[in-house]
Amino acid sequence: MALEGDWFTEVAPGAEMALGLKLRKKLAEERSPYQHIEIYDTESFGRLMVIDGCVMLTSRDNFIYHEMMAHAALFTHANPRRVVIIGGGDCGTLKEVLKHPGVEHVLQVDIDEAVTRLSEKYFPELCESNSDPRAELSFADGVKWIEAADAGSVDVLIVDSTDPVGPAEGLFAEPFYRACRRVLGERGIFVQQSESPLLHTDILTKMHADLSAAGFATTATLSFPQPTYPSGWWSATLAGPNVGEFRQTAATAKRFPTRYYTAAVHQAALARPAFLEDALSES
């Protein structure tokens, strides 16, 4: 058990930098068949979930990530009714998707049930919509689910995964994107967390190239602050018919609360910094 005053430190490989959070105590630890999960109580960021030594979420700042993963994609689609989340075991993205009244069904496919069960106990605010009749939880391999799904059966596909190592490695590759394109159909919208624009430019450029090669007509990366992820700057990458446009009027007039996402934030997040524009142009 961590003692009061200890620090959790995550070192960003190759970046020569680290994030530290002062701890109060360790609340839980579990080694599932897939990964090592730890839950801590911190001094200033509330509860902290760590998987394989990396920060997954904290109580204080998770809303930024979950809102950007959900609402940007749903307001980009003309009429999102059928949504699938690959990963997302903490259920925060699921909660945000279910705020959209037009959504009829959300299937969440996460390989590790332990993440969800620990979230239900230690992050209940993220799991409060799990009992919504439109929600369905499946604990299975997301890549295999996509391969077996019917063509054109999904409107919005959200890949809320961990970093591209271990169980999530297969989610960052052209064959997976090609399978996603088939499942989405012509009007479908895809979104995936795409790491730090500053530290992981190579991952982002490969993702854009692979999505294009898989048959997606357009791609766009939205960037946003995420204080407890490496560099404090994160992103989500969209793909679909025309992901540079979204239902701005509907987003402005949304009838549910958000703490970060707004139509103006969505529009601003689409802007690419010069270094990323150059990297994508070169690729």
Image: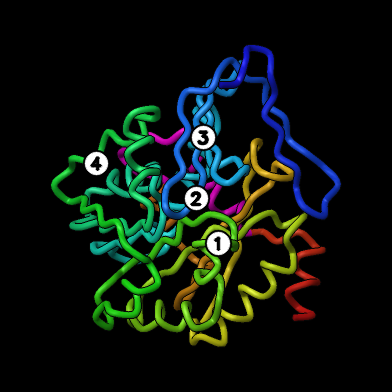
The residue pinned by badge 3 equals 38
4 or 3: tag closer to the N-terminus? 3
* SS of the residue under disc 4: loop
Amino acid under label 1?
Gly
Which coloring applies here?
rainbow
Q: Is residue 7 magenta?
A: no
Residue at 63% in and 80% down: 209
- Binning the other alpha carbons within 10 Å of mark 1 as few (below 14), some (14 to 19) or many (20 upward) gives few
Residue 68: percent from the left, percent from the top? 49, 49
Number of the front mark, 4 or 2: 2
Residue at 76% in and 65% down: 276
- Binning the other alpha carbons within 10 Å of mark 2 as few (below 14), some (14 to 19) or many (20 upward) gives some
Residue at 20% in and 57% down: 105
Residue 246 seen in render: yes
4 or 2: tag closer to the N-terminus? 2
Label 4 – label 2 distance at C-alpha: 23 Å
The residue pinned by badge 4 equals 130
The residue pinned by badge 1 equals 166
The residue pinned by badge 2 equals 35
As drawn, is 238 to the left or to the right of 195? left
- Binning the other alpha carbons within 10 Å of mark 4 as few (below 14), some (14 to 19) or many (20 upward) gives some
* The magenta segment: 252-270
Amino acid under label 2?
Gln
